[in-house]
Amino acid sequence: MWDREGIPAEIRKGLLLDVALELRNFPLFPCVFHLQGLSSRCGMDGIPKRREFHGRPEQRAVCSDTRSIFSRFFFGLFFQGNSFQSFDLKLVWVDEKCGEKSAPGSHGLRITTPEETFVLSAKEPHIKAAWRWKLEQAVRQALRGKRDFPLWGHAGQGSAAPSHRFFSYTFGAAGRLRGATYEGEWRWGKPHGKGTLRWRDGRNHVGDFQEGLEHGFGICLVPWRSEDRYDCYKCHWYQGKMRGYGICEYGNDTVYKGYFKDNVRQGFGILENFSAEHPFKYTGQWENDKKNGYGVWEDRERGERYIGMWLDDHRHGAGIVVTQSGICFQRTFHADKMVSQISAPQGKLSFANGFVLEGTFSARKGRGLQTHGTLNTSMEKPEEPRSRAQLGLKEFPVEKRWEGIFEQFLEFVRCGCKEEMEESFTGFHIQSSKELRKSQEYLFCQRGTEEISWKTEDILEELVQHWELESLQRYLEQALKSSLHPLGKLLRALTMVFQATYSGIGATRHLLSMAQEEVKFYAQKIWEFYQALLRLALARKGRGPSGDAEPRIGKGSGVILALILPRLYPELSMLYMLGHERQDELYGQGIAELSRFPDIRLLEFLDVHRHLWPLQDLPLSSEQRRSLIKDQCFLSATECLQKLITTADPAAKLAVLRQTYEELQSAVSRAPHREAPHREAPHREAPLPMDDLLPLLIFVVSRAKIQRLGAEIHLIRDFMDPANHGGMFDFLLTALESCYEHIQRLRLHPRESGRRSQSS
C-alpha cells in the first residue's frame, strides 16, 4: 500500500488508488513516438476526451478513449484503438503555466519532449495538481536512475525536476535533424549548452547550443562525398548559422581565416593554399562569399602579387602588379583583364634598374605586352621628390584599405564588450585540425594560453588605472604584445595584412609611401580603439567623458607608433633600403674610401682643427702618437653611433644621435689647446658650432660604418615626432644628413689617393 502521509489535500482528493496500483504494475512498452511540430490535448480525469492534432487538415485526428501510464523510465499515452506512444522520462518537461488556451473550464499542463509539445487538460485544479506531482516525481526518479515507480513522499520531496539535463537522443521526425543524434545538455526539450550533434552522413558538430540551434563557438566536420576528406569549420555561430570570426580548413588543404555572416564569408578574411598545384594567398575583403573590395592576391607559381580592387572574385578597378623580377606597374582592370582608355597615361611600369615607363598598356594573345608612353631613364636623382615614383596613393586612400578589420573591433566596443562575444569580433587562436579530420569521435578546441589573464572585465577595470605617461606606456606595451588582449589582436591582424602587402614579392621602393602612411594610420586607429575601450570602462563606473577622463599624454598615436614599429620594422626598413638604394651605394663607396685612412691622416683630410684632436699633449714622438691614436680616436662616440641600428623606435634613434653628440662634446672638452692659442678653447657646456661639428661627425660616421645609413635617416625623418621639429633633435638629424650627402659626393684626387696609400 502507498503511504498517504504528507499528501496535499487537493492531491489526495483527486487520487484513485485502484487506478494507481494498476498503473504501477503496467508492463514496459519499448516503443517511442515522435510528432514534431504538432500539439495535442487529452483528458486527465478518466473521462473520454476529444484529441485533436493542430496541423494540416489531413493530420487531424480524434480520439475518444485516452489513458496514461508510467512504466519505469517511460511515460506513455494510450489513444483510441491500439495506438501507443511513449516518452523517455529523462527528456520530458512538465510546465503548469500552459501558454496555450485550454478549453473552457479546463486546466492544462504543457508536456514538452524533444520533438513534440502537447497539453494535458483537467476539469479540476486538484486533478491537475495530482498529475503534475506524479509526472514531476517520475521524471526525478528517472533522472536519478531509480527503476521503481515514485511513491507519494513526505513534504519537501515533490519539487520540480531540473530544467537543465544531460542526455543522448536520436531525432526521428522530418526536418534538418532527422536521423541526427545529439548528446549533451538540454533545456525544456531543446539542446541548450555544450553538446555534440552527429548526422548519419558523417557530419559532426561539437560546441555551444541555444534553444535547439548552434549558437556560440563550435567545430563542425563535413565529410566529402567522393573522397575520404573533411572540411573543418571552427567558427562562431549565431542562431544556427556561422557568424563572426572563424577558421575553416577545407579538405583540399585550403584554409580560410576571417569573418562569416549567414554561413558565407563576409568582411575581412585570408584564404590560402600553398600546397596546391597553383599555390595562392588572398588577403582582403569578402562579400557574399566572394572577393569584393580592396585585397592582395599572391600567385606564388607566377611570382606575382596584385594589390588593388576586386569585384565578384575578379580583379576589377585600379590595381598594382608587382613581379618577382622587380617589375611594378599600376593599371586599371576589368574582369581580370587590363583595359586601355583614350584619356591620359593609364599605368607605370618600373624596372629593377630604376627606369620607369609611363603610358598606356595593352596585351594581345601571342603578341605580348604593348605600350605607348614615355621611358624615364633619369634614375631619379636624390634631390627629386620621392612621390614622383610612388604608386597607389590616390587610388587606394589609406582609410579605405582595411575597413573590414577596424569595423569588427569597433563593433565589439559598441556591443558593450560582452565576454561571450569577444572572440566572435576579435578572433582567436586554435590548433590545426588536420588530426581531427581523421576522427569523428573526438573533437576538441584549445586556445592559446598566457600567464596573464585578459578577461574583458579585467581589461576594462585596469584601463582606468593608467593615467600617467610611463604607466600607460608599460600597459600598452604589454597589451600589444599579448595574443589575447583586444589591442594585441588588432595589432596582430594589422601586422598580417602589412606583411601580406609589402613583404617578399611586394618589397618594392614604389610602395614606400603607401606603407609609410599605412603605418601611421595603424597607430591612429589603435589609439582610437583604446580610447573607445577607455570610454566604455569609464561609463561603467559612472564617469562621463570629459577632458579629465583621459590620460594627459599629448598625441596618443605617437605613443602607439613607437610601440608598433618593431612589429612592422622588417618590412618597412626593407622598403626604405630599396627606396634609397642608389644613394646608399654611393655612400658605401665613400665610406670604403675613407676607411683606408689612418685616424691622423683622416683628421687632416677632413680639416678637423688640431685643437680638437684627442691625446695631443702626450710627450710622445709623432710616430708614437699616431700609433696610439690609430683606430681609437673618438672611439666612445663611434661605438655610440653604431647603436643607431639596434632599435626600431625613431625616438630612440634620435636619443642615440644625441648621446653621440654628447660623447663628441665630452671628447673635445678634454682635448688640450696649446697648439691653437689663436682660438679660444670651447667651454665644456658650450655646443659645438656647425663648422667644427660637421667634420668631426663625418669622422665618426666613417668609423662607425653604418650600412644603409640613408634608409635610417629617412625613416627617422618620416616618423619623427612633429614636436621635435626645429629643436635639438632636428639640428642633429640635419647634421647627420649633411654628413651623409657629403660622403656621397666625396671623390678623392688621384694624388691624395696615392698619399693615403703611402701613409697607410
Image: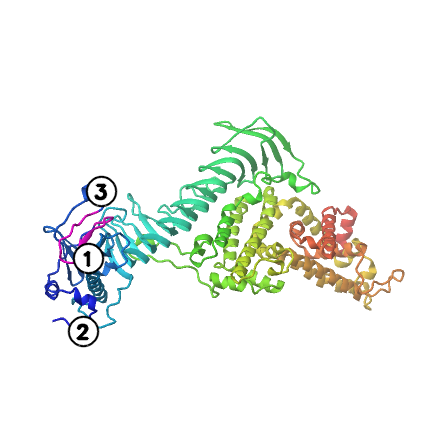
Q: Are marks 2 and 3 in contact (CB under 8 Å)?
A: no
- Point out the frontmost of discs 2 and 3: 2
Q: Position of residue 518 (x, y in %)?
A: 58, 47
Q: Quadrant of the C terminus?
A: bottom right
Q: Secondary structure at mark 1?
A: loop
Q: Where is residue 308 shown, x and y percent of the image? A: 52, 39
Left-right relation of 22 to 439: left
Mark 1 residue type? Lys
Bin the neighbour count of mark 3 within 10 Å (Cα to Cα): few under 14, some 14-19, many 20 and up. Answer: few
Residue indicated by mark 3: 56
Residue 38, disc = none
Examine the rendering and report whether any part of residue 760 can be seen: no
Label 3 to label 1, Cα distance in Å?
28 Å
Residue 406 located left or right of residue 141: right
User: Mark 2: which amino acid?
Assistant: Glu
Q: List the single residue furthest toward the right.
A: 678
Give left or right: position of 741 versus 677.
left
Count of marks placed on residues = 3
- The amino acid at mark 3 is Arg
Q: Are marks 2 and 1 in contact (CB under 8 Å)?
A: no
The residue identified by callout 2 is: 5
Q: What residue does disc 1 label?
A: 123
Distance from disc 2 to disc 1, alpha carbons, whole Å, reads 26 Å
Secondary structure at numbered mark 3: loop
Q: Mark 1: few, some, or many residues within 10 Å (few <14, many ≥20)?
A: some
In space, the residues marked 2 and 3 are separated at their CA atoms by: 48 Å
Which residues are the magenta region? 35-53
